[in-house]
Amino acid sequence: MTTLTQEEIASFIVKRDRAFRTVVKNAGPPPPRRAAPVKSRFSALVRSITFQLLATSAANTIHARVIEACGGETSPQSVLAAGEENLRAAGLNRTKAQAMLDLAQHCLDGTVDLKAHGKMSNHEVVKDVVKVRGIGPWTAQMYLMHTLARHDVWPIGDYGVRAGWTLLHELDEMISEKDLGAEGPRFAGYESDVAWYCWQAVHFQRLSK
């Protein structure tokens, strides 16, 4: 697939769907994607676990406490050393604390191979990551988009993406995951950037209130 510039990606999306015209004009080109180094992948997954089903402000507060509980950085060793009690005291529920511990153990014993993810397909990465108890498709997709910098991820289960799509297309009801999934092929190769614009649509709506 030919790599497009950020401006070309924006133009591509508008050509595929004119409903994105205004949000593209207001938000500008999507941000460039750069894969995080291997050493950052574990901490990125830990952060994604924290952020599951939480508002950003609350998640940021809890995640800062998780880092503090782990001695200033999150690594497999520091998460295991912190233990479930300290992770829960930081504000995590039992499921998330156990997910972090399970992730740490899986990374140390080789069940999950973070180093190999850069060469894996999206499907292979998701299959590897969801081996961890408490990590589902959403967390895996956020990891693909934000940590591995994949442009071709279509997170149809993300509430913000569904809400943004619904706003942009002025739908009477929230679009279903099934119907949103059917829209993805039009943007093949740049679904992550479409998702970003959906998030921007929600952001702009909140600012207008």
Image (cartoon, grey):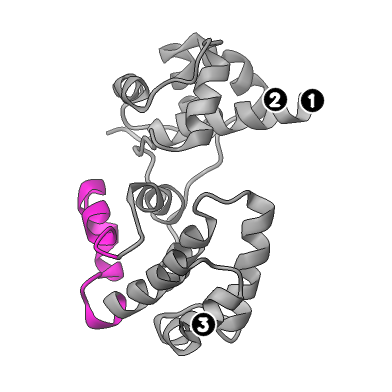
Q: Nearer the viewer, residue 203 or 152?
A: 203
Q: Residue flagged by tag 2: what amino acid is it?
A: Gln
As measured in the structure, the alpha-carbon distance from the residue carrying label 3 to the one carrying label 1 is: 41 Å
Circle 3 sits on which residue? 85
- Circle 1 — which element? loop
Q: Is residue 5 left or right of residue 101?
A: right
> Residue 104, which numbered label?
none
Q: Say above or below: 178 vs 111.
A: above
Q: Which residues are magenta?
A: 107-132
Viewer-nearest residue: 3 or 92:
92
121 left or right of 146 in image: left
Q: Position of residue 29 (x, y in %)?
A: 58, 31
Residue plotted at (42% across, 36% down): 192
Q: CA distance from mark 1 to mark 2?
A: 7 Å
Do labels 3 and 1 touch, CB within 8 Å? no
Residue 205 is tagged as 2
Amino acid at the residue labelled 1: Lys
- Residue appearing at x 61%, y 31% in the figure: 200
Q: Position of residue 69 (x, y in %)?
A: 59, 82
| Residue that label 1 marks | 209
